Image: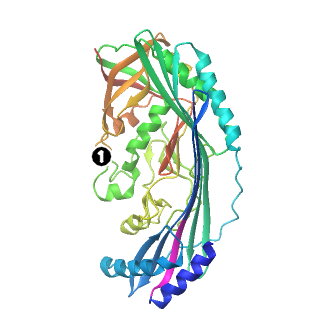
Amino acid sequence: MLEGFFSSFTEHAQRAGITRLQFYVEQVGEQRLQVYEHELERLQLADVTLIYVEGEYAGKRGSTFVENLTPHLFNEHIASIKQTAECSNTPFVPLSFHKLPALQTWDNGLPAFLLEEKLKAAEDAAYALDPRVKYVTECSCLKRTKRILLRDEWGNQMEDKLHYYRMGVAVMAQDGGEVQTARIADFARNIDKLDMVNLAQTTAKRAVSMLHATPVPTGNYPVILHNNVVCELLLTFLPAFFADRVQNSMSRMGGKLGQQVANSNVTLIEDPAFTLGIITRRFDDEGVLTSKKAIIADGVLSTYLHNRKTAERAGVIPTGNGFKRDYAEKPTISPTNLYLQPGQMTLAELEKEIDEGLLITECDGMFAGANPVSGDFSLISKGYLLKGGRIARPVAQITIAGNFFDLLKQVTNIGCDFASSGSENGFVTAPSLLLPSLAVAGE
């Protein structure tokens, strides 16, 4: 079907004076399942093909986006290419094409009925963990595949893919009039790597363990940021390393290439082939090859992330980070898989480093309570009071405050425990971090 569309659309466009056509194609498949009270509550299947078309008309770049591939709409799309070319006055820039090895095949996963049974077993495990688990409000799994194809009118093309699973569990625990909730998600490229029962039990355990949580007195405390909190902080402040933010004076990282911006034990890597990552892209949406690179190496800022536009402005080579957030939009800047290089200490060993302090396991309102430009954050949080290197009691109704970029310089120790979070617009894997002091507002 696609081949027929390419040839037919190209023929119509050329007759209208449009040349040098190039196509960005997304073929997306999704399967969503959710169980509730041991019944299948939701089963959704989706399979769509979306195409963004660019061409040169009167020496300028025009574009259109296609969701219906039938020929009776071709004239409308060709008119759109002409109109956008006349209005935008933007020069046409051809895609780059590279010879790549054949794509590896991905696992076909499980039939829906077997995945449903796994979700039901996970739900059962959450309820069985503790009688105070009253509701498993979410027990769901998403399987998503995406094929990306870059092609021009002469048949040059590059093909890429994404394929991953995401499981989410949310639990409500109750003891008398006290209620606490917990929600955890996990990702894997292979269904066999997704331990659904363990995830459900971990979520239930966290909800139960937070029952009867109370605040701590306001003050400065040594703090362990749990790995999932570190992931969310990195995702929130990651745009500081995007070249467009730097060039527009909207980043504290501006002018700091080659300078120490974090403690020497901090190394932040981007790797499209990272084992635990889901954004396994070989090239970006501008046709530039992706690569493994250190953004921060031993505390030193090594690179910004560039697309073609920012690289040209800076006089450097693009880093392969020109990605679309939506198929119908122009590429902006986005990472593939990021990971904070782990240390040697387990979470329990990190806890032993604290005589009296806090383990922060959850922060709410990350995007509302954080300023990606300045780095300042003030976040409603939950966690545990640590005394004598051990968990003493649960803590809630507190707010932690600080500056992310200052925090990077203060990291004392790094754990070897990993959590992952994010989306196709950026995926982060990180361990827990020990900080010597963080401001906490409580009672």
Q: Position of residue 363 (x, y in %)?
A: 39, 29
Amino acid type indicated by mark 1: Val
Q: Position of residue 396 (x, y in %)?
A: 37, 18
* Residue 343 vs residue 339, the one in the foreground: 339
Can you see residue 235?
Answer: yes
Q: Position of residue 348 (x, y in %)?
A: 55, 19
Above or below: residue 368 compared with residue 65: above
Can you see residue 353?
Answer: no
Q: Is 383 positioned to the left or the right of 107 in the image?
A: left
Q: Quadrant of residue 101?
A: bottom right
Q: Is 249 positioned to the left or the right of 290 in the image?
A: left
Q: Position of residue 297 (x, y in %)?
A: 49, 45
The residue indicated by pointer 1 is 373
The N terminus, quarter of image: bottom right
Q: Is 303 positioned to the left or the right of 149 in the image?
A: left
* Residue 1 vs residue 362, the one in the foreground: 1
Q: Quadrant of residue 234?
A: top left
The C terminus, quarter of image: top left
Determine the secondary structure under disc 1.
Answer: loop
| Residues shaded magenta | 18-25
